[in-house]
Image: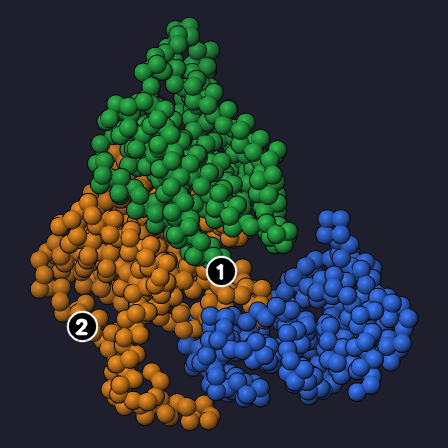
Amino acid sequence: MEALRVEGLSKDFGGIHALSNVSFSVEVGEHMAIIGPNGAGKTTLFNLLNGQLSPTSGRIYFFGRDITTMPTHRCAHLGQARSFQIISLCPNLTVLDNTLITLHGTKRSRFQMFRSINADTRLLAKAQEALSAVALWDTRDELVKNLSYGEQRRLEIALTVTSEPKLLLLDEPGGGLTSAESADITDMIHKLGRDITVLLVAHDMDLVFGVAERIIVLHYGKIIADGAPEEIRVDPRVREIYMGIEENIENATAS
Amino acid sequence: MTIAELKETMRQQPWQVLLIRFAPYILGLIALVILPPFFSTPIQGIWTKFLIFAIFASSYDLAYGHTGLLSLGHAAFFGAGGYTIAVLNLHYGIDSLWIGLPLGILVGALTAVVFGLIALRVLGPFFLMITFALGMLTFSIAWNVRWLNTPGMQGITGVPLPDLGIPGFSWSTISFYYFVLIIFLLCFFLVYRIMNSPFGYSLRGIRDGEPRLRSLGYNTWLHKYLIIIITGAFAGVAGVLYVYYYGMIVPAHLAIGTSFSPMIMVILGGSTTLLGPVIGAAVIEFVGYFASIFTPERWPLILGGIFVVTIMYAPGGINIHLSRLWKRLGERYGSVKS
Amino acid sequence: MSAEAFVLNLLNGLSYGMVLFLLASGLSIVLGLMGIWNLAHGALYMVAGYIGWTIAVHLGMNFWLAVLLGAIAAGLIGLGIERGFLRKLYRQVNEQVLLTFGFLYILTNLSLWVWTGRFRVPFTAPALAGSFIIGDITYPIVRFEIIIIGIIIASGLWWLQERTRIGAIVRAGMDDKEMTMGLGINLDRVSMFTFLLAAFIAGFAGVIGAQFLGVYSGLGLDMLLPALIVVIVGGMGTIQGALFGAVLIGLIDAFGRALFPQLAMFTMYLLMIVILLVRPSGLVGRRI
């Protein structure tokens, strides 16, 4: 079964072709990475999949359903969850508040105006479970802006899985992290198993090759390669654009 | 520790700590109930006015402090509620509270329904300006439409106190105060509930990170729209009470000057808190009253200065500083965080 | 409407429009470059008007000296607000707007205290105190003078915007702040200069405008509101937008008062709302 199918997706901004005729599909449970130089259109692709942008042309199918023009919040209800390139947790709210807000997002209780948010002990237990898994339960009353960058990233990624999504869109989850912290993220993604389909945008080749079973390479908005990691590693076109990253690829294969 | 264990430790907190946590509310309630009869009639009037503006300011803070919507048009909701009462009296001779108050709330909310649809189409600086324009538009409607004015003057005068339908009952300053107090307490309780509900949390999330909230499944437009309508309803309540209090309303009550009042109160008292707008209203009304007797020219200047200083150096308002003081007292009694 | 009445309203509208232009141009450029509505702008106009009155009427000195001193005073106050306060609220747009409102409030009440609430009648230089006679109508010279001054200033500002380096920097800063700063340009300094110039012109407008509007303590708000409409309708970030909007609003105001006085205010605010919904950058403004 296809979790995601993209057909002929294009996005123009004024005169700039951010994406041109992108087509691919993703099976349920597949862990796929999208790589490419800066400006290749990776985040634009995510914004289209997640409903932040509308395509100029093309179609997007999510579990067989046409979500091409669906707004972001509806995409979340259908089972998408996303992390952002720039950490976008609510900085002036506590860790626990952020978690509770995340948990209510896909539930009808988000419109509840009378009962206290703390009255739902089931959700509180779930929050505890999610936060304990990333060792953040003890800092639950701390304002997010007071956490270290690595802790914030960890929290953001952990929160994306709490809603039990069908599709996880991770935009540069390893951005700004140390290699130890990145390794944690890799572990986290491995633990997700076959139920969750994962799409990952990353520059960190360790992360990419540690997680992905399949890689798509974008360049100037077009797919120039689509295949298993070993194929991509040796693909001459990919090597050509990624001259600087070539060394990373060699290091990753060596280790 | 588990949630159950956590709740247990909270229950076991020494009563002193809990008392200090709730002391402001208890003391406040006692003061509001017991003190006013001991003051002269004009001062009782100030107590009343303070409560009315506390309702107005609290509703404003729901939109501004919690949701981050800075608007200059909410005087329209306030005025809509007030004009409802005035028009009911002027053209239909209806003075019943049981008709006037619900209708006033409805009209306030309906105004917000229209405003929200228009204003939420734009963001940021444009939102500010469009709410300003919408507010001034209602002002010019109140100014020009003859049906909204007592013949021969601007606005509507001679509005009596509400008819409770109780035979033989007549109002006094103090009885009207307690009437307003009851309504205030009700509104205060509702605001408290909204603030602590999942919906309230979503508002603060929208303020701090709207794109993220959308990707979590929140229809942020709808949440913002709903809070604007709620704000309109509460402002309508304040407007109704205000017209009962003053017995009149003028178009200026729909203009930008009236929109500034709750803003100042919220900033001074502390936004995004339950007590902040109330404290702000108290300061403005009480200090303002006494200042206007002793230093009428200097008071607006002092107020303006305090306002600027608050924005620059004390953005949490009076409330933050008071609550810090309170917390320190609480910590003296126990090692548990209050 | 008779021909004379038409010309009269035209001149009234244009002269009022020119004063609005002077005020709105600064408001608009500051908004475009710094992203903030300076709600104290009208108050700067008012304070300058009072200072101008003090110099020209109370002390009986030269009118143009009064204009200069009023403008300088406004400029200094504006500089103080920007340097001492606005700068420190970097990126907190809501707080900045509230702050400027605070200064509007303070300046209004300060003026009330120093100069009392008495209305100051329009004043000007003795040479300009007369009128021209057009047909059956006597028309004050000052109105013509204001229109001419307005055109001169507008041309000067337009030249500044289009033909000078600093104008190019300001325009670049409006389009893309990061890129401009990345080019090594100290946008902070440019912003300060822009704010200062805007305040100076607002003060200039305050004394010039006093020639037919007089001075009173409500001016801070009364001049701000139409200026806001001008910026929205005409367009933000450009001199030509401010000019277009100001002339339009000035004419609507003048003809509105004559033809349908009830609806003039209503029309302007309705226009503002429509523009905000349909074309928020204004009719002749920079695309935001």
How dense is the environment of label 1, judged by Cα within 10 Å: few (below 14), some, or many (20 and up)? many
C149 to A18, vertically: above or below:
above
For residue B171, say whether it is visible.
no
User: Marks 2/1: CA distance?
Assistant: 35 Å
Q: Colour of chain A?
A: blue
For residue B273, say whether it is visible.
yes
SS at circle 2: helix
Of residue A30 and residue B170, the one placed in the foreground of this image is A30
Q: Residue at x 40, y 31 (%)?
A: C204
Q: Amino acid at mark 1?
A: Lys
Residue behind mark 2: B30
C38 to A130, vertically: above or below:
above
Residue behind mark 1: B224
Going from the N terminus, do you reach mark 2 or mark 1 first? 2
Q: Is residue C184 left or right of residue B78?
A: right
- Residue C226 in percent (x, y) is at 42, 35
- Residue C265 in percent (x, y) is at 41, 33
| In the rendered image, residues at marks 2 and 1 fall on the same chain | yes
- Residue C87 in percent (x, y) is at 44, 54
Determine the image quadrant of residue A213.
Answer: bottom right
Determine the image quadrant of residue C254.
Answer: top left
Of residue A65 and residue C108, the one placed in the foreground of this image is C108
Q: Amino acid at mark 2?
A: Ile
Q: Residue at x 76, y 52 (%)?
A: A16
Q: Is residue B130 left or right of residue B92?
A: right
Q: Residue extending furthest top? A: C135
For the C terminus of chain B, the image quarter is bottom left
Q: Colour of chain C?
A: green
Chain assigned orange: B
Q: Residue at x 64, y 74 (%)?
A: A176
Q: Residue at x 38, y 30 (%)?
A: C68
Pointer 2 chain: B
